[in-house]
Image (spheres, helix red, strand yellow):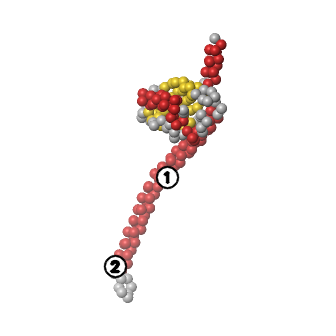
């Protein structure tokens, strides 16, 4: 103990020095522990950085693939779609039946197609989901001035476990072919 008005005693100085040595040792141990923990964290950071760089590269590659896909689809008679398990559109490759992709996404077939077609189309897609098999059909959509014919192919869209979670499909405009067939039959 320090005397109230005097100099510290030798015992007091020894106690203070012992406490300081103990605190210094504790700080050195804490620094050693931090250094030991730092190396695995730095290795983990380096690994994660490499993974992120690889993911960034993959995202760029996918973006280029998507751009090629979209360029190839423009002006074609092909429409590619995906729908969730409730058969609501989650994506569509292009404008369809005078509706933009943004107008179609989130809607069901009965909201996109005329009533006489929407229900049958929903049944076809439900069968793909229920049975887990591809479904094909031709669909005639009656228009005011002309009919539109589509060749449809739908497949179940599966999660990683293999369970159907929606559908993916393609609709090909075959109107010209159907009109040619009709003309050919008229000439026979």
2 vs 1, front mark: 1
Residue positioned 49% across, 52% down in the render: 42
Residue 161, position in %: x, y? 42, 34
Asked whether the viewer can see residue 105, the reply is yes
Residue 167, position in %: x, y? 49, 33
In this view, the residue farthest toward the top is 188
> Mark 2 — residue?
11
141 to the left or right of 127: right
Determine which of the numbered discs, if any, sits on residue 69 in the image.
Answer: none
Label 2: state its secondary structure: helix
Quarter of the image with the N terminus in it: bottom left
In front here: 175 or 79? 175
**Neighbour tally class for label 1: few under 14, some 14-19, many 20 plus, Cα within 10 Å:** few
Mark earlier in primary sequence (2, 1):
2
In front here: 151 or 164? 151
Residue positioned 53% across, 48% down in the render: 49
Label 1: state its secondary structure: helix
In the displayed structure, 183 sits above or below 51; it is: above
* Number of marks in picture: 2
**Neighbour tally class for label 2: few under 14, some 14-19, many 20 plus, Cα within 10 Å:** few
Residue 70, position in %: x, y? 62, 35
> Mark 1 — residue?
42
Residue positioned 60% across, 26% down in the render: 147
Asked whether the viewer can see residue 83, the reply is no
Residue 68, position in %: x, y? 63, 35
């Amino acid at each position: 103990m320090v005397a109230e008005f005097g100099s510290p005693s030798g015992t007091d100085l020894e106690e203070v020095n012992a406490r300081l040595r103990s605190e210094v040792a504790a700080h050195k141990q804490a620094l050693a522990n931090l250094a030991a923990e730092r190396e695995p964290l730095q290795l983990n950071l380096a690994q994660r950085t490499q993974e992120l760089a690889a993911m960034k590269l993959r995202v760029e590659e996918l973006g280029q693939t998507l751009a090629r896909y979209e360029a190839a689809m423009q002006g074609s008679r092909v429409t590619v779609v995906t729908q969730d398990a409730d058969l609501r559109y989650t994506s569509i490759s292009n404008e369809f039946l005078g509706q933009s992709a943004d107008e179609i996404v989130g809607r069901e077939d009965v909201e996109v197609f005329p009533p006489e077609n929407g229900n049958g189309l929903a049944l076809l897609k439900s069968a793909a989901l229920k049975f887990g098999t591809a479904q094909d059909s031709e669909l005639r959509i009656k228009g005011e001035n002309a009919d539109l014919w589509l060749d449809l192919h739908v497949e179940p869209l599966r999660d990683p476990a293999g369970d159907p979670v929606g559908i993916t499909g393609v609709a090909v405009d075959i109107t010209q072919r159907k009109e040619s067939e009709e003309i050919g039959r008229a000439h026979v």
